[in-house]
Image: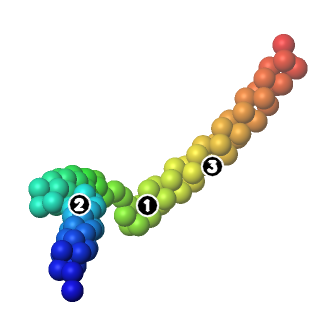
C-alpha cells in the first residue's frame, strides 16, 4: 500500500475541512453580536425608556389638572344661568324699546 498517496489525500481533506471550519467561523462571528454591542444596545434602550418614563410622568401630572365631569357640569350650570339672565335682559330691553316708541309717538303727535 502506498502511504504517501494516502497521506497526501489525508492532508488535502484535512486542509479543506480546516478551511470550511474557518470560513464557517468567520461568517458566524461576523454576524454575531459581541458583548460590547449588546451592552451598547442595552444602554441605548435604557436611555430611551427613561425618556419615555419622564414624558409619561409629565403627561400624568398634566392630566391631574384637567377638568373632570363635575367641573363641566358646574360650567354648564353657570352657562344656563347666564343664558336665562340674558333672556330676561332681552325681554326687559324689548319692553323698554316698546315704551320708548310709545313715548316718541306721543311726543311727535302732540307737538
Q: Residues within 10 Å of mark 1 (few under 14, many from 20)?
A: few
Which residue sits at x=57%, y=51%?
83
Q: Residues within 10 Å of mark 3 (few under 14, many from 20)?
A: few
Which residue sits at x=11%, y=56%?
36
Of all residues shown, which one is farthest toward the top?
111
Quadrant of the snapshot with the C terminus: top right
- Residue 16: x and y, percent? 27, 68
Q: Eyeballing the image, is 56 above or below 5?
A: above
Label 1: which secondary element: helix
- Residues 20 and 87: in front is 20
Q: CA distance from mark 2 to mark 1?
A: 68 Å
Find residue 26 and name its label: 2
Looking at the rendered structure, the number of numbered marks drawn on it comes to 3
Residue beneath disc 3: 87
Q: Nearer the viewer, mark 1 or mark 3?
A: 1
Label 2 or label 3, whichever comes before in sequence order: 2
Residue beneath disc 1: 72
Find residue 4 and name its label: none
Q: Eyeballing the image, is 83 above or below 18?
A: above
Q: Is residue 17 left or right of residue 70?
A: left
Q: Are marks 2 and 3 in contact (CB under 8 Å)?
A: no
- Residue 47: x and y, percent? 17, 53
Q: Eyeballing the image, is 28 above or below 104?
A: below
Label 2: which secondary element: helix
Amino acid at each position: 500500500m502506498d502511504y504517501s498517496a494516502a497521506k497526501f489525500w489525508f492532508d488535502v481533506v484535512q486542509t479543506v475541512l480546516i478551511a470550511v471550519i474557518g470560513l464557517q467561523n468567520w461568517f458566524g462571528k461576523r454576524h454575531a453580536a459581541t458583548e460590547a454591542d449588546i451592552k451598547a444596545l442595552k444602554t441605548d434602550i435604557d436611555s430611551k425608556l427613561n425618556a419615555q418614563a419622564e414624558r409619561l410622568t409629565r403627561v400624568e401630572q398634566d392630566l391631574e389638572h384637567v377638568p373632570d365631569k363635575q367641573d363641566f357640569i358646574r360650567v354648564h350650570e353657570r352657562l344656563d344661568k347666564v343664558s336665562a339672565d340674558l333672556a330676561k335682559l332681552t325681554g326687559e330691553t324689548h319692553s323698554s324699546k316698546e315704551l320708548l316708541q310709545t313715548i316718541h309717538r306721543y311726543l311727535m303727535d302732540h307737538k
